[in-house]
């Protein structure tokens, strides 16, 4: 078996108590930063320029075929217990050539409709696809995260730090089999590790906008939420804490201040309080600022099933770490746990040996510097 073939034989990790999930209505979701071609072109340098046939790694004409073949391969995952169909929902980050290629390709070949949110001034963004025989679109919201610069008062640093052209795509679907509402939050946060407060503010902004978006649908029924994408944040980050712990401390020496007409960062959702710490035997008074997740606590699909997150989801020249996730939460009739989303299985990720086939990703086998995550969920 070649390494190319082995990428099609990843195994499912199952949740032990989910043995009766076949009787329930469910779906499978895939999230994948597919590496925008504008960034792939920059790989014509070390270590790729010294690799034989490196043009096949970075060329769009080759990459698009490998990307689509890889996506289709997850409909043939190694699961002897039941036939595996294509994921019903697919989330792309760094999706370019959307109008020219992906929208038509996914519709014609996989029977999927889609929504797309492009980054301001860039030719890539977040695209969400769903199978038309399973879901119908109810609402859609494009979020331009550069709008944070109009909400956060940070002086001269505001436009540079908070005006970053990142994006999120919010698509509210309704399941044709169960009539349940499902909100897909597909996002791509800022990359720079020097500014964790920017990433945290972006995540809070997305969550608050999503919470506001589904209120009209939440009064009479439960709305399930799947939060997926490239968070550019490790499992020990403030962004991760905000999502799974329901709150996070803003990592700044001085508290953030917000414009007076801002209705997103309110006193109830961002709490600033005094804090006393001990340094060298002396008491020091400071200020601690905490952001609260309007949804409460999300669950991580991979951590729920495997006990931990993958060891890496991004493997490039100089960095290896986990930046991509799939989270779930239900808003509404919380007492009815039978109607809440449960992750029944996740697809194993590739090994470091596979990822290092050509020192780092992308490679001839794996067409992006990120790896996809795949999870099956039931109501």
Image (tube, grey):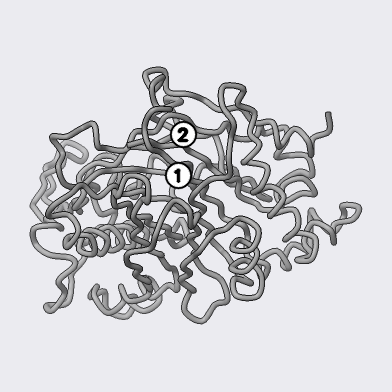
Q: With 13 as the anchor, is 69 left or right in this view?
A: right
Percent of width and height locating residue 207: 27, 57
Residue located at (65% from left, 58% from top) = 109
Q: With 133 as the anchor, is 144 left or right in this view?
A: left
Q: Mark 2 and 1 residues: CB-CB less than 8 Å, in contact? A: yes
- Quadrant location, the C terminus: top left
- Helix, strand or loop at label 1? It is strand
Q: Is residue 95 above or below residue 28?
A: below
Q: Picture quarter containing residue 340?
A: top left
* Disc 2 from disc 1: Cα separation: 8 Å
Mark 1 lies on residue? 325
Q: Is residue 307 above or below residue 28?
A: above
Percent of width and height locating residue 173: 35, 57
Q: With 192 as the anchor, is 82 left or right in this view?
A: right
Mark 2 lies on residue? 309
Q: With 159 as the anchor, is 356 left or right in this view?
A: right
């Amino acid at each position: 078996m070649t390494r190319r073939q082995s990428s099609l034989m990843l195994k499912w990790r199952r949740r032990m108590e989910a043995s009766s999930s076949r009787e329930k209505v469910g779906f499978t979701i895939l999230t994948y930063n597919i590496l925008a071609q504008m960034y792939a072109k920059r790989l014509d340098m070390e270590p790729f320029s010294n690799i034989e046939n490196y043009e096949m790694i970075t060329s769009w004409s080759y990459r698009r075929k490998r990307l689509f073949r890889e996506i289709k391969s997850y409909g043939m995952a190694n699961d002897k217990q039941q036939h595996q169909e294509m994921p019903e929902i697919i989330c792309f980050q760094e999706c370019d050539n959307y109008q020219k290629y992906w929208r038509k390709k996914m519709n014609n070949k996989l029977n999927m409709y889609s929504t797309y949110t492009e980054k301001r001034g860039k030719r890539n963004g977040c695209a969400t696809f769903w199978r038309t025989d399973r879901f119908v679109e109810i609402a859609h919201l494009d979020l331009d995260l550069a709008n944070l610069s109009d909400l956060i008062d940070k002086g001269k640093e505001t436009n540079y730090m908070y005006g970053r052209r990142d994006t999120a795509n919010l698509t509210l679907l309704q399941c044709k089999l169960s009539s349940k509402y499902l909100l897909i939050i597909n996002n791509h946060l800022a990359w720079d590790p020097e500014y964790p407060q920017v990433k945290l503010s972006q995540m809070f902004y997305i969550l608050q906008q999503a919470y506001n978006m589904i209120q009209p649908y939440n009064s009479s029924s439960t709305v399930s939420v799947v939060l997926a994408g490239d968070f550019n944040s490790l499992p020990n980050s403030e962004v991760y804490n905000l999502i799974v712990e329901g709150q996070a401390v803003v990592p700044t020496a001085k508290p953030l201040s917000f414009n007076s007409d801002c209705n997103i960062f309110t006193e109830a959702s961002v709490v600033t309080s005094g804090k006393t710490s001990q340094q060298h035997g002396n008491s020091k008074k400071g200020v601690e600022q905490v952001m609260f997740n309007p949804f409460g606590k999300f669950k991580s699909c991979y951590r729920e099933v495997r006990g931990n997150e993958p060891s890496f989801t991004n493997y490039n020249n100089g960095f290896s770490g986990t930046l991509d996730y799939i989270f779930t939460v239900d808003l509404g009739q919380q007492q009815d746990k039978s109607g809440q989303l449960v992750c029944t299985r996740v697809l194993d990720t590739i090994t470091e040996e596979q990822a290092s086939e050509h020192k780092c990703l992308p490679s001839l086998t794996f067409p992006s510097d990120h790896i996809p995550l795949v999870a099956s969920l039931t109501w």
